[in-house]
Amino acid sequence: MHVQFSLKFAYSFLYKPPEAPLLAKLKQRALSSLHCFSLPTYLVEKMGGFSFRSFTFMFIIAFLVWSSNVETCYARRGRHWRQTTTTSSASLYKKKGKSHHHNNGSKSKPKHSSPPSMPTNPPRKGYDDVPSSTIFDVRDFGATGDGKTDDTKAFQAAWAAACKVEASTFVVPSQYVFLVGPISFSGPYCQHNIVFQLDGTIIAPVDAKSWGSGLLQWLEFTKLVGITVKGSGVIDGRGSVWWQDTPYDDPLDDELKLIIPLNKTSLRYPSIPLNSSLGGGKMPSIKPTALRFYGSFNVTVTGIKIQNSQQCHLKFDNCIGVTVYNFTVSSPGDSPNTDGIHLQNSKDVLIRSSNIACGDDCVSIQTGCTNVYVHNINCGPGHGISIGSLGKDNTKACVSNITVKDIVMQNTMNGVRIKTWQGGSGSVQGVFFSNIQVSEVQLPIVIDQFYCDKSKCKNQTSAVALSGINFERIRGTYTVKPVHLACSDSMPCQDVTLTDIQLKPIQERYHMYDPYCWQTFGELYTPTLPPIDCLQVGKPSSNRIQGDHDQC
């Protein structure tokens, strides 16, 4: 119907030209219509020089298109639409903004149907790229951040809210110190991909009543998917009050028996001075891990620092898909049992580009771990990087596919080590230690299948089977013994290879020893310094057959 009317109008227009004023007005209207369809400006402007018949032809085309598509043009009004009615309408448009127009009858929805309401929690500085509706700042839930007021309940409330929103951001803001007691940030009903943005400082209470009879962890994340803890903040366990109360109740590292001072005095942890202002009664004997992840998938920890943990700093238990990088641990070398990173029953783990200084193993890999890759770590002080101890109390241990490479160790007790108990079962296989730089390390290379953290342990015949253990490019200086390979009589170590070992002694305050091997079979692929003549080439002749209970 529109087309029929347009053709009749065009016919009368061609054979009965309008007067000049009407023609000018129609021309202006046609040019406006052509603007709607985004014709280039220079074409529209040149139409001023067209002849009457040329203009008539263009007018017919424009009128036909306009009459059938006028709603489309109106629906497309947006940031490029020009109001031509009144100046007051144009000024109103500027006040309203670029993208809050009504639909004007179009069936398709506009980009924004109404102006957005102001967020109840305005974005904090530094989180502008995160939608405000997904930010949960602990200050908005009552946290004080003065380092004295207990903010535990505020953290719990903020987590309860963040837990309900997928990809939410739990914010611990910078320039604040939050005193937080034992707390669990738990699933399994939380949404996925929550970010725990730690830019401030979290400190632990140092009064005994906050801990009761003792807990295994302080800050715990359980049964979560895609949990990320990141930022530039600090977790401070203020552990000195724990270390001083019971400095000798914890088991000591068994490798201390190999380190004998020149003056024949026994080695013990030195007394750690206690800041009496932190005191609040005798702390419980059970010491917590500072930060623990349990039963979680796709866990990331990056940027943060954990210092002065009561015991272990960072622990992953029953986790799949773990990434740790740009991470820092800082505790005194004489703080007892303060492992840097502890892995147990976890697989597909990447730990890289981190600095770890502690009083025990920089990285400890326990039973149930597989596909673990550790590289570019600065370790020291500490006890090195260890697999084990495994098989304690006649338990079965299974560890496989472990790579530790590109490590710098300075002033540590051990370099790279595997330690197992007599009486255990299971296996350790597929271990690759490569490119380890040691400086004044007491025992750079260790396999100890007679591990015992008590004063005396009974001899047992069963053992965790070790095979496919590779030491490559381990270089630097040592202060006690370069190599200590002590394997089980009934289950000797097999396929142990040493390549490019260059270790030089530094005479300090300990007795020096030559390389030691016992029931260790494998290959020397290059000459070593010092010569490791004790390694037995080939395979053991009388190795017992591994039983079903030993298989992993």
Image: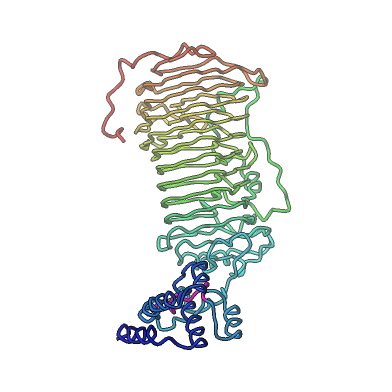
The residue lying toward the viewer, choosing from 374 and 30, is 30
Q: Residue at x 49, y 37 (%)?
A: 364
Residue 327 location in percent, x, y?
57, 44
Which colour scheme appears in the figure?
rainbow
Residue 478, picture quadrant: top right
Q: Quadrant of the N terminus?
A: bottom left
Q: Is residue 395 visible?
A: yes
- Name the magenta segment's main secondary structure: loop
The answer to whether 388 is drawn above or below residue 482 in the figure is: below
Which range of residues does the magenta coloring cover?
A: 72-81
The residue lying toward the viewer, choosing from 369 and 139, is 139
Residue 495 location in percent, x, y?
37, 21
The residue lying toward the viewer, choosing from 142 and 487, is 142
Quick check: is 448 in the magenta stretch? Answer: no
Q: Residue at x 46, y 23 (%)?
A: 471
The answer to whether 251 is drawn above or below residue 245 in the figure is: above
Residue 402 location in percent, x, y?
42, 33
Residue 457 location in percent, x, y?
46, 30
Q: Is residue 286 visible?
A: no
344 sits left or right of 441 in the view: left
